Amino acid sequence: MIWSLQILRFVAALMVVYVHAAQTAVKVTGSNGLLPHDFQVAGFAGVDIFFVISGVIIAKTAPGLTWRSFAWRRFRRIVPLYLLISIPYAIVAYKTGFGWREGVATLLLWPATDQMTAPALPAAWTLCFEMLFYAAATIVLVDRRLLSALIGIFGLAMIFRSAGPVLQFLGNPLIIEFGFGIALAYAPKWKPAVWCLPIGAGAMIAVGFIGMAPQGGTMEFLTGDNGFQRVLVYGFPAALIVFGTMQIDARPSAWTVLGDASYMLYLIHTLPITLLLMVWTTFPIPPDLIIVIGTAVSVLFAWRMYIRFELPLRIFLRRYDPHLKTGYRPTGEALRD
């Protein structure tokens, strides 16, 4: 386990929580608070950091697994928790209009039917790309010779993206960010490269001030509008941050525990922020307090949900690992991810 990346996972999730808390502050008070909007938008790049980290982790762990074991581990790590948390969001969506497209997007994490459709859980648009990447990795584990075919399909889909939602999804430039992570997994360790971390962070922040921050919402991200721009201004700096972080020797700590809880934080943070929005609409407070309290409450809530709910679920599902049936005992790295 690269423990420094585990900590970076928490930082990436915290970036997303922060920007959503800041958006809540604007809704309530009309103000961004002490830090300007051009700085706050960098929080959206937490998603790009996640994508690059996923590329690193999968490239390092998948080669030691069979395709069946890899697919099961990815499924048990992502899908059960996601589906359980999606239930209340799907219920709310059902009351406002939840058709078969929404069902496919939510249950299968496949947003591309006859039109692009987002899952009921807002944050799950990123999981659509995660699962697509895991599916590609599984196919490569079945037969490595299929790698060139997958790259060719991605290239063709990117060229013909205007043909429809399926090609828009399969050819989304955001997939390149997973490729960045794969490349970094094979890069030799180089201690001086730790300076890539502040350089990448500075570049992410500068993007907002020079007017190059990607615009749009979930649908635009799924369809890949301004996708190449995002890969350039967020994806490449994210790769620098990840590479710099990989040069840091970290050890297990409270921060790595928070990193392990980052998936729960990412999935569930909109719930406490939405509930607090209802309170602050009635009893408004200064925007900076909204941001601080919203972020802190989200982290605390996600951490408790991780301890009480996610960990027991993961332990339960781990019993059905195909490797365990043959006497294999996974390493700490495999258990953690």
Image (spheres, rainbow, N blue to C red):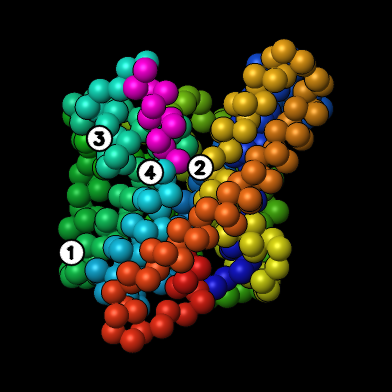
Q: CA distance from mark 4 to mark 1?
A: 30 Å
Helix or strand or loop: what does disc 1 sit on? helix
Q: Residues within 10 Å of mark 3 (few under 14, many from 20)?
A: some
Helix or strand or loop: what does disc 3 sit on? helix
The verdict on residue 89 being magenta is yes
- Would residue 12 be seen by someone viewing this image from the given angle? no
Helix or strand or loop: what does disc 2 sit on? helix
Query: Does the magenta stretch mainly form a helix, a strand or a loop?
Result: helix
For the residues carrying marks 4 and 3, which lies nearer the camera in this image?
4
- Would residue 114 be seen by someone viewing this image from the given angle? yes
The residues colored magenta run: 85-95
Contact, mark 4 vs mark 3 (Cβ under 8 Å): no
Give the amino acid at mark 3: Val
Helix or strand or loop: what does disc 4 sit on? helix
Give the amino acid at mark 2: Leu
Q: CA distance from mark 2 to mark 3?
A: 19 Å
Q: Quadrant of the N terminus?
A: bottom right
Q: CA distance from mark 2 to mark 4?
A: 10 Å
- The residue to which callout 2 is attached is 267
Rendered location of residue 272, percent (x, y)? 62, 33
- Give the image quarter of residue 116: top left
Give the amino acid at mark 4: Leu
* Residue displayed at 22% across by 41% down: 157
Q: CA distance from mark 4 to mark 3?
A: 12 Å
- The residue to which callout 1 is attached is 146
The verdict on residue 129 being magenta is no
Counting residues from the N terminus, which is met first, the one under dot 2 or under dot 3?
Answer: 3
